Image (cartoon, rainbow, N blue to C red):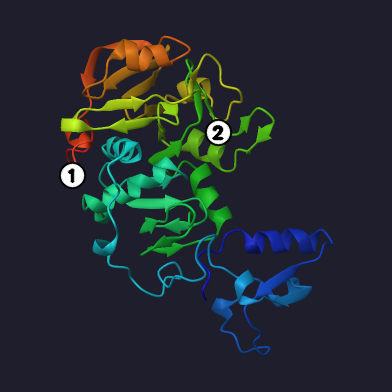
Amino acid sequence: EKEALFLESLAIALAAHNSQGLVLVQVERLAATGSLHPRQVKIPGILVDCVVVSRPENHWQTFAQVYNPGYAHEIVVPTATLQPMVMDERKIIARRAAMELTPKCVVNLGVGVPEGVAHIANEEGLLESLTLTAEPGVIGGIPASQPNFGAAINVAALIDQPSQFDFYDGGGLDLAFLAFAQTDQEGNVNVSKFGRKVAGAGGFINISQNAQKVVFMGTFTNGLKIGVPGGRLQICREGDCRKFLSHVEHMTFSGDYAKIRKQEVLYITERCVFTLTQHGLELTEIAPGIDVERDILAQMDFRPLISEKLRLMDERIFRDSLMGLSLKTARL
């Protein structure tokens, strides 16, 4: 009743039961046998070995909230009450990414910076013309940001996570917005391993390699500080960790495979945009106020291709006012 997601609970219970394992189910309360409506039963009793009645403090709805009726889909949340994003590097990146949205597109939003695309779509009044999804199983509405990622408000449908990945793996996504931690001259992306720390790929490979188009989003360097005086981007402090490397430490997304599929791939940062070509990364856009040599090339371990039609990013991205974005004019 109060859960935000179905996730893969049934699949896990089936796998454990059929492998002679134990299935333990955590619940808020007990109900008499036969008193629940069958449509509310997600894990049949024949699969369950033990039921644990949880203390309230151990049964939170998300990592950050004990209970939100919007995440339980009990109410429709007025989208006008949602706070707009503050003008910073994350909003700049999300605004540029939102310009890739098209009418009736089905979209996946990854964790981190890509979450901002949902907020921009709401601010600009675009939500009615597209469908946002997140990998845990939400379809439509507005996916939540960290630390509530996975939950969503005002969803059109809620399915289990394995079914969502069946949809993703089958090429159902028109567009995926995903974060990147490292990328290289061949367009490869790493989000899964850094030194001895193994974060894992999660659903990143399934989503990124099967979407019709993928947009990677992230700051140009890690730990930077920016300003936008007069609508021009200023790097007040450069980050201390480069992200554009000669070779990624671990390959979570293959640029070569994307080329074989002829997949459209963009890499959007606060200061510039790259496109994946058959010959590697190509610089196609720069922010107003940015010097190509000082702010871009000097901060990379390789020299990318530079488009003969190199242009400025849309100046509306860097102003506090609404962009006036519409899906008819969304793509540049």
Q: Nearer the viewer, residue 280 or 235?
A: 235
- Sequence order check, earlier mark of 1 and 2: 2
Crowding around mark 1 (Cα neighbors within 10 Å: few <14, some 14 to 19, many 20+) is: some
Which quadrant would residue 156 be assigned to in this image?
bottom left
Q: Secondary structure at mark 1?
A: loop
Nearest to the observer: residue 42 or residue 1: 1
In the displayed structure image, the side of residue 20 where residue 13 appears, left or right: left
- Residue at the location (60% across, 34% down)? 192
Which residue is tagged 1?
326
Q: Which residue is mark 2?
A: 191
Three-letter code, disc 1: Ser
Circle 2: element type:
loop
Instruction: Indicate the position of residue 181 as horizontal and vertical percent values.
Output: 50, 30
Residue 331 is situated, as x and y percent measured from the top left of the image, at 23, 34
Foreground of the two, 57 or 50: 57
Name the amino acid, label 2: Val
Residue at 72% across, 62% down: 14
Label count reads: 2
The label nearer to you, 1 versus 2, is: 2
- Between the residue at mark 1 and the residue at mark 2, the CA separation in whole angstroms equals 32 Å
